[in-house]
Protein backbone atom coordinates (compact mmCIF):
# COMPACT_ATOMS: atom_id res chain seq x y z
CA UNK A 1 0.00 0.00 0.00
CA UNK A 2 1.46 3.34 -1.02
CA UNK A 3 1.25 6.41 1.19
CA UNK A 4 0.31 9.61 -0.58
CA UNK A 5 1.22 13.03 0.82
CA UNK A 6 -1.48 15.48 1.83
CA UNK A 7 -2.12 18.01 -0.96
CA UNK A 8 -4.44 20.96 -1.38
CA UNK A 9 -6.67 20.98 -4.44
CA UNK A 10 -5.39 22.86 -7.47
CA UNK A 11 -7.18 25.81 -9.07
CA UNK A 12 -7.84 23.61 -12.12
CA UNK A 13 -9.55 20.92 -10.04
CA UNK A 14 -11.54 23.52 -8.09
CA UNK A 15 -12.95 24.98 -11.33
CA UNK A 16 -13.77 21.60 -12.87
CA UNK A 17 -15.37 20.39 -9.64
CA UNK A 18 -17.61 23.44 -9.50
CA UNK A 19 -18.72 22.91 -13.10
CA UNK A 20 -19.55 19.26 -13.21
CA UNK A 21 -19.57 17.46 -9.87
CA UNK A 22 -23.35 17.61 -9.70
CA UNK A 23 -24.34 13.96 -9.53
CA UNK A 24 -23.94 13.45 -5.77
CA UNK A 25 -25.86 16.19 -3.92
CA UNK A 26 -24.83 17.35 -0.45
CA UNK A 27 -27.81 15.62 1.14
CA UNK A 28 -26.62 12.25 -0.21
CA UNK A 29 -22.84 12.59 -0.07
CA UNK A 30 -21.45 10.86 3.01
CA UNK A 31 -17.95 9.93 4.07
CA UNK A 32 -16.99 6.69 2.36
CA UNK A 33 -18.95 7.27 -0.86
CA UNK A 34 -16.94 7.02 -4.08
CA UNK A 35 -17.57 8.88 -7.33
CA UNK A 36 -17.79 6.97 -9.59
CA UNK A 37 -18.55 3.94 -7.46
CA UNK A 38 -16.50 1.71 -9.80
CA UNK A 39 -13.92 2.09 -12.55
CA UNK A 40 -14.91 -0.27 -15.36
CA UNK A 41 -12.92 0.60 -18.47
CA UNK A 42 -14.42 -2.06 -20.73
CA UNK A 43 -12.52 -3.34 -23.77
CA UNK A 44 -9.22 -1.68 -24.68
CA UNK A 45 -6.22 -2.85 -26.67
CA UNK A 46 -2.64 -3.60 -25.70
CA UNK A 47 -0.61 -0.39 -25.61
CA UNK A 48 -3.60 1.97 -25.28
CA UNK A 49 -3.54 4.96 -22.94
CA UNK A 50 -6.36 4.44 -20.44
CA UNK A 51 -6.72 7.05 -17.70
CA UNK A 52 -9.35 8.03 -15.18
CA UNK A 53 -9.92 9.32 -11.67
CA UNK A 54 -12.06 8.58 -8.65
CA UNK A 55 -13.19 10.75 -5.75
CA UNK A 56 -13.75 9.45 -2.25
CA UNK A 57 -15.76 11.63 0.13
CA UNK A 58 -14.11 11.95 3.54
CA UNK A 59 -14.73 13.81 6.79
CA UNK A 60 -13.63 17.46 6.52
CA UNK A 61 -11.35 17.00 9.52
CA UNK A 62 -9.55 14.17 7.73
CA UNK A 63 -8.88 16.48 4.79
CA UNK A 64 -6.72 18.73 6.95
CA UNK A 65 -3.36 17.09 7.20
CA UNK A 66 -4.15 13.41 7.65
CA UNK A 67 -2.13 11.00 5.47
CA UNK A 68 -3.79 9.06 2.67
CA UNK A 69 -2.93 5.38 2.22
CA UNK A 70 -3.61 4.04 -1.27
CA UNK A 71 -3.55 0.41 -2.35
CA UNK A 72 -4.14 -0.07 -6.08
CA UNK A 73 -4.47 -3.47 -7.76
CA UNK A 74 -1.30 -4.57 -9.61
CA UNK A 75 -2.60 -3.48 -13.02
CA UNK A 76 -3.46 0.08 -11.95
CA UNK A 77 -1.08 2.98 -11.26
CA UNK A 78 -2.03 5.94 -9.06
CA UNK A 79 -0.36 9.01 -10.58
CA UNK A 80 -1.68 11.76 -8.32
CA UNK A 81 -3.60 12.26 -5.07
CA UNK A 82 -5.30 15.48 -4.00
CA UNK A 83 -7.13 16.12 -0.76
CA UNK A 84 -9.30 19.11 0.13
CA UNK A 85 -12.73 20.36 1.12
CA UNK A 86 -15.70 21.63 -0.84
CA UNK A 87 -18.73 23.65 0.18
CA UNK A 88 -21.93 21.98 -1.00
CA UNK A 89 -24.83 24.16 0.05
CA UNK A 90 -24.59 24.72 3.78
CA UNK A 91 -22.43 21.64 4.29
CA UNK A 92 -18.70 21.15 4.00
CA UNK A 93 -17.47 17.89 2.52
CA UNK A 94 -13.96 16.55 2.43
CA UNK A 95 -12.71 14.72 -0.63
CA UNK A 96 -9.76 12.72 -1.87
CA UNK A 97 -9.25 12.55 -5.65
CA UNK A 98 -6.97 9.94 -7.18
CA UNK A 99 -5.86 10.01 -10.80
CA UNK A 100 -5.09 6.57 -12.20
CA UNK A 101 -3.88 4.84 -15.34
CA UNK A 102 -4.35 1.28 -16.52
CA UNK A 103 -1.36 -0.93 -17.36
CA UNK A 104 -2.10 -2.17 -20.88
CA UNK A 105 1.28 -3.76 -21.58
CA UNK A 106 -0.21 -7.24 -21.84
CA UNK A 107 -3.55 -8.78 -22.73
CA UNK A 108 -5.85 -10.23 -20.11
CA UNK A 109 -8.97 -9.88 -18.03
CA UNK A 110 -8.21 -7.67 -15.05
CA UNK A 111 -10.30 -7.12 -11.94
CA UNK A 112 -9.50 -5.90 -8.46
CA UNK A 113 -10.08 -3.10 -5.97
CA UNK A 114 -8.53 0.30 -5.41
CA UNK A 115 -8.25 0.78 -1.65
CA UNK A 116 -8.18 4.24 -0.10
CA UNK A 117 -7.73 4.83 3.63
CA UNK A 118 -8.03 8.23 5.31
CA UNK A 119 -8.55 8.90 9.02
CA UNK A 120 -9.17 5.25 9.82
CA UNK A 121 -11.89 4.86 7.16
CA UNK A 122 -11.14 2.44 4.33
CA UNK A 123 -12.95 2.51 0.98
CA UNK A 124 -12.71 -0.11 -1.78
CA UNK A 125 -13.48 0.91 -5.37
CA UNK A 126 -13.92 -1.98 -7.88
CA UNK A 127 -11.72 -1.73 -10.99
CA UNK A 128 -12.00 -3.87 -14.12
CA UNK A 129 -10.80 -3.91 -17.72
CA UNK A 130 -10.51 -6.28 -20.65
CA UNK A 131 -7.17 -5.73 -22.43
CA UNK A 132 -7.08 -7.50 -25.77
CA UNK A 133 -4.36 -7.90 -28.40
CA UNK A 134 -4.20 -5.37 -31.25
CA UNK A 135 -6.47 -6.16 -34.19
CA UNK A 136 -6.15 -4.66 -37.66
CA UNK A 137 -9.15 -2.88 -39.13
CA UNK A 138 -10.49 -1.41 -35.88
CA UNK A 139 -11.36 2.29 -35.73
CA UNK A 140 -8.62 4.06 -33.78
CA UNK A 141 -10.42 6.49 -31.49
CA UNK A 142 -9.03 8.93 -28.96
CA UNK A 143 -11.49 10.11 -26.30
CA UNK A 144 -10.35 13.38 -24.81
CA UNK A 145 -11.03 13.67 -22.08
CA UNK A 146 -11.83 10.39 -20.40
CA UNK A 147 -15.40 10.01 -19.10
CA UNK A 148 -14.23 7.86 -16.17
CA UNK A 149 -13.56 10.73 -13.80
CA UNK A 150 -14.25 11.96 -10.29
CA UNK A 151 -16.44 14.74 -11.71
CA UNK A 152 -18.65 12.58 -13.91
CA UNK A 153 -21.15 10.49 -11.97
CA UNK A 154 -21.59 8.53 -8.76
CA UNK A 155 -23.15 5.60 -10.67
CA UNK A 156 -20.72 3.80 -12.97
CA UNK A 157 -23.56 2.00 -14.78
CA UNK A 158 -24.06 5.30 -16.64
CA UNK A 159 -21.09 4.23 -18.80
CA UNK A 160 -22.54 0.83 -19.73
CA UNK A 161 -24.18 2.02 -22.95
CA UNK A 162 -20.93 3.57 -24.14
CA UNK A 163 -18.90 0.46 -23.28
CA UNK A 164 -21.32 -1.66 -25.31
CA UNK A 165 -20.98 0.73 -28.22
CA UNK A 166 -17.18 0.34 -28.09
CA UNK A 167 -17.59 -3.40 -28.63
CA UNK A 168 -20.40 -3.15 -31.18
CA UNK A 169 -18.58 -0.56 -33.33
CA UNK A 170 -15.19 -2.26 -33.24
CA UNK A 171 -13.21 0.53 -31.62
CA UNK A 172 -9.58 0.62 -30.59
CA UNK A 173 -10.13 3.33 -27.99
CA UNK A 174 -7.83 5.38 -25.79
CA UNK A 175 -8.91 7.59 -22.88
CA UNK A 176 -6.73 10.60 -22.16
CA UNK A 177 -7.15 12.54 -18.93
CA UNK A 178 -6.75 16.31 -18.60
CA UNK A 179 -3.82 17.51 -16.54
CA UNK A 180 -3.29 21.19 -15.74
CA UNK A 181 -0.36 22.94 -17.40
CA UNK A 182 0.32 19.96 -19.66
CA UNK A 183 0.24 19.71 -23.46
CA UNK A 184 -3.13 18.27 -24.29
CA UNK A 185 -2.35 16.05 -27.25
CA UNK A 186 1.41 15.83 -26.86
CA UNK A 187 1.34 12.26 -25.50
CA UNK A 188 -0.57 10.80 -28.46
CA UNK A 189 0.54 10.24 -32.05
CA UNK A 190 -2.41 11.81 -33.86
CA UNK A 191 -1.13 10.36 -37.14
CA UNK A 192 -2.15 6.92 -35.88
CA UNK A 193 -5.76 7.90 -35.13
CA UNK A 194 -8.94 7.83 -37.20
CA UNK A 195 -11.28 9.79 -34.92
CA UNK A 196 -10.90 12.19 -31.98
CA UNK A 197 -13.86 12.70 -29.63
CA UNK A 198 -13.59 15.96 -27.68
CA UNK A 199 -15.50 16.06 -24.42
CA UNK A 200 -16.05 18.88 -22.00
CA UNK A 201 -12.77 19.19 -20.10
CA UNK A 202 -10.86 18.29 -23.26
CA UNK A 203 -12.35 21.32 -24.98
CA UNK A 204 -11.49 23.58 -22.05
CA UNK A 205 -7.86 22.46 -22.13
CA UNK A 206 -7.25 23.01 -25.87
CA UNK A 207 -4.38 25.37 -26.62
CA UNK A 208 -3.64 26.97 -29.99
CA UNK A 209 -1.11 24.25 -30.97
CA UNK A 210 -3.76 21.59 -30.24
CA UNK A 211 -6.30 23.35 -32.45
CA UNK A 212 -3.80 23.51 -35.32
CA UNK A 213 -2.92 19.85 -34.81
CA UNK A 214 -6.58 18.85 -34.98
CA UNK A 215 -7.20 20.99 -38.06
CA UNK A 216 -4.30 19.28 -39.84
CA UNK A 217 -5.63 15.90 -38.68
CA UNK A 218 -9.01 16.65 -40.26
CA UNK A 219 -7.46 17.96 -43.45
CA UNK A 220 -5.61 14.64 -43.85
CA UNK A 221 -8.84 12.66 -43.51
CA UNK A 222 -9.57 12.36 -39.79
CA UNK A 223 -12.81 13.12 -38.01
CA UNK A 224 -13.17 15.29 -34.91
CA UNK A 225 -16.41 14.95 -32.91
CA UNK A 226 -17.18 17.83 -30.57
CA UNK A 227 -19.69 17.77 -27.70
CA UNK A 228 -20.44 21.15 -26.10
CA UNK A 229 -23.14 23.43 -24.76
CA UNK A 230 -23.46 26.68 -22.86
CA UNK A 231 -24.27 24.96 -19.56
CA UNK A 232 -20.56 24.18 -19.23
CA UNK A 233 -18.80 27.50 -19.32
CA UNK A 234 -16.15 27.90 -21.98
CA UNK A 235 -17.01 24.84 -24.04
CA UNK A 236 -18.94 26.79 -26.70
CA UNK A 237 -16.15 29.30 -27.28
CA UNK A 238 -13.60 26.50 -27.44
CA UNK A 239 -15.76 24.45 -29.82
CA UNK A 240 -16.14 27.41 -32.16
CA UNK A 241 -12.38 27.55 -32.63
CA UNK A 242 -12.77 24.29 -34.53
CA UNK A 243 -16.24 24.89 -35.96
CA UNK A 244 -16.10 28.39 -37.45
CA UNK A 245 -13.22 27.66 -39.89
CA UNK A 246 -15.28 24.78 -41.35
CA UNK A 247 -18.56 26.69 -41.71
CA UNK A 248 -20.40 26.07 -38.43
CA UNK A 249 -21.04 28.13 -35.30
CA UNK A 250 -22.49 27.09 -31.96
CA UNK A 251 -24.65 29.70 -30.24
CA UNK A 252 -23.74 30.44 -26.63
CA UNK A 253 -27.35 30.04 -25.46
CA UNK A 254 -28.17 28.85 -21.96
CA UNK A 255 -29.76 25.41 -22.43
CA UNK A 256 -32.19 26.03 -19.58
CA UNK A 257 -34.02 28.33 -21.94
CA UNK A 258 -34.23 25.79 -24.76
CA UNK A 259 -34.32 22.18 -23.53
CA UNK A 260 -34.89 19.33 -22.88
CA UNK A 261 -36.17 18.23 -26.24
CA UNK A 262 -36.84 15.02 -28.12
CA UNK A 263 -36.98 15.17 -31.90
CA UNK A 264 -38.37 12.75 -34.45
CA UNK A 265 -38.04 12.03 -38.19
CA UNK A 266 -39.22 15.51 -39.23
CA UNK A 267 -36.20 17.11 -37.60
CA UNK A 268 -33.66 14.45 -38.62
CA UNK A 269 -32.02 15.04 -42.00
CA UNK A 270 -31.50 12.06 -44.29
CA UNK A 271 -27.81 11.28 -44.42
CA UNK A 272 -25.63 8.16 -44.08
CA UNK A 273 -24.79 9.38 -40.58
CA UNK A 274 -28.46 9.36 -39.58
CA UNK A 275 -29.33 5.93 -40.97
CA UNK A 276 -31.71 4.14 -38.55
CA UNK A 277 -31.93 7.30 -36.43
CA UNK A 278 -35.62 8.02 -35.81
CA UNK A 279 -35.44 9.93 -32.54
CA UNK A 280 -32.86 11.96 -30.59
CA UNK A 281 -33.10 13.21 -27.02
CA UNK A 282 -31.28 16.21 -25.52
CA UNK A 283 -31.52 17.03 -21.84
CA UNK A 284 -29.77 20.36 -22.35
CA UNK A 285 -28.49 21.71 -25.63
CA UNK A 286 -27.06 24.69 -27.43
CA UNK A 287 -28.05 25.18 -31.08
CA UNK A 288 -25.69 25.24 -34.04
CA UNK A 289 -26.01 27.34 -37.19
CA UNK A 290 -24.49 26.82 -40.63
CA UNK A 291 -22.42 29.77 -41.83
CA UNK A 292 -21.05 28.13 -44.99
CA UNK A 293 -23.46 25.76 -46.77
CA UNK A 294 -20.74 24.67 -49.18
CA UNK A 295 -19.01 22.90 -46.32
CA UNK A 296 -21.55 22.23 -43.59
CA UNK A 297 -25.02 20.79 -43.04
CA UNK A 298 -27.40 20.20 -40.16
CA UNK A 299 -28.07 16.56 -39.22
CA UNK A 300 -30.87 17.19 -36.71
CA UNK A 301 -32.71 20.49 -36.34
CA UNK A 302 -34.26 22.30 -33.39
CA UNK A 303 -38.07 21.96 -33.45
CA UNK A 304 -39.55 25.08 -35.03
CA UNK A 305 -36.10 26.31 -36.11
CA UNK A 306 -34.98 24.32 -39.18
CA UNK A 307 -31.99 26.64 -39.63
CA UNK A 308 -30.61 25.68 -36.20
CA UNK A 309 -29.11 22.29 -35.46
CA UNK A 310 -28.90 19.95 -32.52
CA UNK A 311 -26.23 18.10 -34.46
CA UNK A 312 -24.30 19.05 -37.60
CA UNK A 313 -21.27 18.13 -39.67
CA UNK A 314 -18.82 20.04 -41.86
CA UNK A 315 -16.41 18.71 -44.46
CA UNK A 316 -12.83 19.97 -44.40
CA UNK A 317 -10.09 18.69 -46.67
CA UNK A 318 -10.33 14.88 -46.68
CA UNK A 319 -12.01 14.70 -43.28
CA UNK A 320 -14.76 16.38 -41.30
CA UNK A 321 -15.82 17.92 -37.98
CA UNK A 322 -19.07 16.92 -36.25
CA UNK A 323 -20.79 18.81 -33.45
CA UNK A 324 -23.46 17.63 -31.01
CA UNK A 325 -25.04 20.26 -28.79
CA UNK A 326 -24.68 18.37 -25.53
CA UNK A 327 -21.53 18.51 -23.42
CA UNK A 328 -21.91 15.30 -21.41
CA UNK A 329 -21.59 12.89 -24.33
CA UNK A 330 -21.48 9.68 -22.28
CA UNK A 331 -24.64 10.72 -20.43
CA UNK A 332 -26.27 11.73 -23.73
CA UNK A 333 -25.72 8.17 -24.97
CA UNK A 334 -26.93 6.61 -21.72
CA UNK A 335 -30.23 8.49 -21.97
CA UNK A 336 -31.28 6.84 -25.22
CA UNK A 337 -32.66 3.67 -23.64
CA UNK A 338 -34.74 5.52 -21.10
CA UNK A 339 -36.12 7.93 -23.69
CA UNK A 340 -36.37 5.31 -26.47
CA UNK A 341 -34.19 7.45 -28.72
CA UNK A 342 -31.31 6.64 -31.07
CA UNK A 343 -28.53 8.74 -29.57
CA UNK A 344 -26.18 5.76 -29.46
CA UNK A 345 -26.91 4.92 -33.11
CA UNK A 346 -25.92 8.41 -34.22
CA UNK A 347 -22.77 8.32 -32.13
CA UNK A 348 -21.86 4.89 -33.51
CA UNK A 349 -22.07 6.33 -37.03
CA UNK A 350 -19.98 9.33 -35.99
CA UNK A 351 -17.15 7.30 -34.47
CA UNK A 352 -16.68 5.33 -37.66
CA UNK A 353 -13.93 6.90 -39.79
CA UNK A 354 -15.01 9.07 -42.71
CA UNK A 355 -14.32 7.96 -46.26
CA UNK A 356 -11.04 9.42 -47.46
CA UNK A 357 -11.74 11.99 -50.12
CA UNK A 358 -9.18 12.71 -52.80
Image (tube, rainbow, N blue to C red):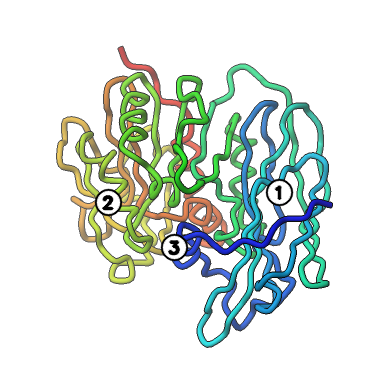
| Marks 1, 2: nearer the viewer | 2
Q: What is the spatial separation of the Cα atoms under label 3 and label 1, in whole angstroms?
A: 26 Å
| Residue 269, image x, y percentages | 30, 43
| Residue 93, image x, y percentages | 61, 77
Image-quadrant location for residue 286: bottom left
| Marks 2, 3: nearer the viewer | 3
Give me the residue at 59% from left, 46% from top.
162
Q: Is residue 62 above or below residue 316?
A: below
Give me the residue at 48% from left, 55% from top.
332
Q: Is residue 266 visible?
A: no
- The disc, 2 or 3, on the residue closer to the chain's N-terminal end is 3
Q: Give the quarter of the figure containing the C terminus.
A: top left
Nearer to the camera, 68 or 88: 68
Q: Which residue is mark 3?
A: 15
Image-quadrant location for residue 47: top right
How crowded pointer 2 is (Cα within 10 Å; few <14, some 14-19, many 20+) is rated as some
Q: Residue furthest top?
A: 358
Give me the residue at 67% from left, 62% from top.
6
| Residue 110, image x, y percentages | 81, 40
Nearer to the camera, 281 or 235: 235
Q: Which residue is mark 2?
A: 237
Q: Which residue is mark 1?
A: 40
- The disc, 1 or 2, on the residue closer to the chain's N-terminal end is 1
Q: What is the spatial separation of the Cα atoms under label 1 and label 2, in whole angstroms?
A: 32 Å
How crowded pointer 3 is (Cα within 10 Å; few <14, some 14-19, many 20+) is rated as few
Q: What is the spatial separation of the Cα atoms under label 2 and label 3, in whole angstroms?
A: 17 Å
Q: Secondary structure at mark 2?
A: helix
Give me the residue at 34% from left, 67% from top.
259
Amino acid sequence: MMRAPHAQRSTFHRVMFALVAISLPASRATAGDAQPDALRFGTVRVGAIVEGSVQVWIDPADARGRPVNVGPPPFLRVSDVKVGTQKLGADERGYCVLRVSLNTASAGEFAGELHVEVGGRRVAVPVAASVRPPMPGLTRLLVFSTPFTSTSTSDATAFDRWLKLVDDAGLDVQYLDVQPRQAVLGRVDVEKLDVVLLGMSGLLALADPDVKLLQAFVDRGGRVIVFANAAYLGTVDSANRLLVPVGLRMLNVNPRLTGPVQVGPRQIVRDPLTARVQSLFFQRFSPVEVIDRRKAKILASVPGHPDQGLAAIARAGRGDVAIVGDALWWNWVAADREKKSNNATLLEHLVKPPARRQ
